[in-house]
Amino acid sequence: MKNSDNLLEVHPQEFVEFLNQANIRQFYFVFDRAQKKIIASHPELQPIADFILTDKRDFLEHEGLFFRVTEKYDTLLGAFVHRTVRGQAAGGVRFWQYDNLESYLRDGLRLAKGMTRKNALAGIWWGGGKGVISHNPSLDKNDPEIRAYLYRQYGEFLTALRGCYVTAEDAGTNVTDMHNVFSQTRFTTCIPAGVGGSGNPSVPTASGIVCGMEAALDFLNLGNLEGKTIAIQGLGNVGQPLVKFLFEKKVKKIVAADIYPELVDKTSAQFSEYNFEAYLVDRSDASILFTECDIVSPCATGAILNKTTIPKIQAKIICGAANNQLEDAARDDDLLHERGIVYVPDFLTNRMGIVTCADEQFGYVTSDPFIEQHLTRDWEFSIYQTTLRVLNESGKTGVPPARVAMRLADELSMQPHPIFGHRGQQIIDSLMNELFSE
Ligand code: NAD
């Protein structure tokens, strides 16, 4: 058995083994704002709390981190609540495999903080959080029965957390999984359309990317999208409608790449009447980013803007849907800025997923003004206006745009919810003494 000092280095399943032997099924780390320390639910877990507290990279005074191990299948479920000043923590639940406990915790911390910023910049009344389920590699993650069990357990877990975190769909999680979560808790969004959910948000996400591109072009006084050449990495759920919207805006040419031949063939056929060129790449081929064009739009995976790729980029603007495009947020924001490339921060333009699903309990209106305002030119918090505000500020101060956007987001994230105030923290406070008294 591991001792509690080196738990961060062990595989999440070894950590689960440690918890089982210590008879711990649920645990938490809660930030004590007054004393500026993190309180662990169990003394043997305090070294983990101390590690998180001293971490400068991913920890940003997260209000509470909650965990449970499933009775069957030994799977670690986590709910990472970053900041709930604007409302309960909202963000998707990821089902992913990790090499060690530290990378599992870091992913949750980083993603939760990212959701606070995305939601605040979007002007929606939600705080930020993220769920992470660590995939137990001894299980077949595609087995429908195992998945159903795990996601129902996740729903039960959220019910026990009383709504300080409200989940949604994220990488590794699908619509059926969300249905299973919903069967056990009301604290979820992104449920299937058949039971009152908002359905697939990828089309509005693509519209949001177009707004970001238009703002960046305006910032550079380059006119509109007409006649421009765009390179798109990834022809998936967002990439495909993006191609359509861009041709509607009369772009001159689109070059795109994907790793799936079916998608390359399908889109080539679909857009055969336009100046559209799609080609097949393997996963490590980033050549699409180096296309001679006006705008590069990363719509595949994260960390693609880095020391190796940035020097080869020829476009003036980068604006796409992929999450966490900068491999190293500070370094790569600087590198792009030094090269005079305008980077539109992903968490600013790819908001439409959370925007369409976060408030689905308030019902639906055709062409919903609350949703469509994000895609307008005039609303203060629209993607266009926020992008322009961030780029103008960056231009004025010389501070790279992702950093400007983060600063603005952090400021907005401290505005209390107009009706409920900082209720998420109250929920956490009330949980502290009750939920985990086993
Ligand atoms: P998706 O999985 O449907 O599409 C991604 C596409 O990228 C796939 O077709 C895949 O084959 C391709 N791809 C992967 N690696 C590649 C590579 N190295 N080169 C070229 N293509 C590659 O995902 P999506 O829903 O279209 O989302 C795209 C990105 O935007 C993801 O990073 C996602 O997290 C992010 N995002 C999506 C939404 C949304 O509403 N769908 C919202 C916010 C953020």
Image: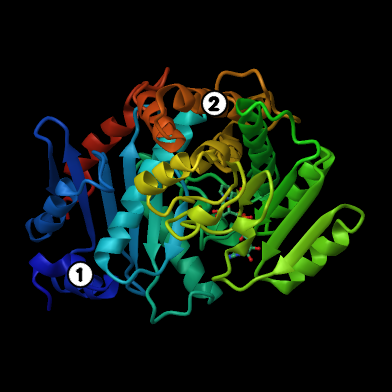
The residue at the point 10 percent across, 57 percent down is 47
Query: What's the coloring here?
Result: rainbow
SS assignment at label 1? helix
Nearest the viewer among 313 and 390 is 313
Q: Quadrant of residue 104?
A: bottom left
Residue furthest to the bottom in view is 138
Q: Quadrant of residue 227?
A: top right
- Above or below for 272 versus 261: above
The residue at the point 61 percent across, 32 percent down is 216
Percent from the top left, x then y, of residue 184? 46, 53
Nearest the viewer among 238 and 302 is 302
Q: Amino acid at mark 2?
A: Thr
Q: How many marks?
A: 2
| Dot 2 crowding, Cα within 10 Å, few <14, some 14–19, many 20+ | many
The residue at the point 21 percent across, 46 percent down is 56
Left or right, 51 with respect to 412, comes to: left
Percent from the top left, x then y, of residue 236? 67, 59
Q: Amino acid at mark 1?
A: Glu
Numbered disc in front, either 1 or 2: 2
Left or right, 12 with respect to 134, comes to: left
> In what quadrant of the picture does the C terminus appear?
bottom left
Residue that badge 1 annotates: 9
Question: Is residue 159 among the parts visible in the rendering?
Answer: no
Question: Is residue 395 among the parts visible in the rendering?
Answer: yes
Task: Say which mark, if any, is on residue 66.
Answer: none
Q: Earlier in the sequence, mark 1 or mark 2?
A: 1
C-alpha separation, residue under disc 1 versus residue under disc 2? 40 Å
Nearest the viewer among 150 and 338 is 338
Percent from the top left, x then y, of residue 22? 13, 69
- Above or below for 180 versus 82: below
Residue that badge 2 annotates: 386
The residue at the point 10 percent across, 55 percent down is 46
